């Protein structure tokens, strides 16, 4: 008799555990949570040419390094900056960074910029996986907190 009691208790406990571990609400932290916002940011960036209206490198205003340059974020992932006589070509993308262990806040979307230039070139300063602060039809605000020296870089594009 005790054997039957323990067996039925074990069965009930198993069903109880299964019902609590199998919930119908999926984890809302899935990597696809930002997919719609990523598409919107990509679409905004591709919708014309842009200029840098603020580039602050660890407290130093270096916006003038990019005066006269128009930036085109192309749908093939290429990024072209031109000022009439000089053309710089790089790459760009927008990616989900929510899998990062440090993503406890809203900077789960990265705006990635890369120009294959030497370290001495001003465009090398733009190479980073920038956190998206805000976007609108005419403005893209980005920020990066350096892991090395803790400095904060800010980059703002405004539509031409």
Image (spheres, rainbow, N blue to C red):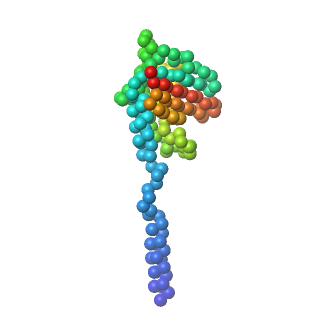
Residue farthest front in this picture:
137
Position of the C terminus by quadrant: top left
In the picture as drawn, the residue positioned furthest to the bottom comes out as: 1
Q: Is residue 152 left or right of residue 96?
A: right
- 117 to 103, vertically: above or below: above
Q: Which residue corresponds to the image point at 53% horizontal and 22% vertical from the top-left?
A: 53
Q: Nearer the viewer, residue 67 or 27?
A: 67
**Residue shown at 57%/28% (left/top)?**
154
Total number of numbered discs in the rendering: 0
Q: On screen, 32 above or below 116?
A: below
Report which quarter residue 37 is drawn in.
top left
Res. 120 visible in picture: no
Rendering coords of residue 19 (x, y %)? 45, 68
| Extreme residue toward the left, this view | 76
Q: Which residue lies at the image location 59% right of the left edge and 33% below the top edge? A: 145
Q: Position of residue 34 (x, y in %)?
A: 45, 43
**Residue sitting farthest toward the top:** 85
Q: Residue at x 49, y 36 (%)?
A: 110
- Residue 47 visible in rendering: yes
The percent coordinates of residue 91 (x first, y second) are 42, 27
Percent of width and height locating residue 137: 44, 30
């Amino acid at each position: 008799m005790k054997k039957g009691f323990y067996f039925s208790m074990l069965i009930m406990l198993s069903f109880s555990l299964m019902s609590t571990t199998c919930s119908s609400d999926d984890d809302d932290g899935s990597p696809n949570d930002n997919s719609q916002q990523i598409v919107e940011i990509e679409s905004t960036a591709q919708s014309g040419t842009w200029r840098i209206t603020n580039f602050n490198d660890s407290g130093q205003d270096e916006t003038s390094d990019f005066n006269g340059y128009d930036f085109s974020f192309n749908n093939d992932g290429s990024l072209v900056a031109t000022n009439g006589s000089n053309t710089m070509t790089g790459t760009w993308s927008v990616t989900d960074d929510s899998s990062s262990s440090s993503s406890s806040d809203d900077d789960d979307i990265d705006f990635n910029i890369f120009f294959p230039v030497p370290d001495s070139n001003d465009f090398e300063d733009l190479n980073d996986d920038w956190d998206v602060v805000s976007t609108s039809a005419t403005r893209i605000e980005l920020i990066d907190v350096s892991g090395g020296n803790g400095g904060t870089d800010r980059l703002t594009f405004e539509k031409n």
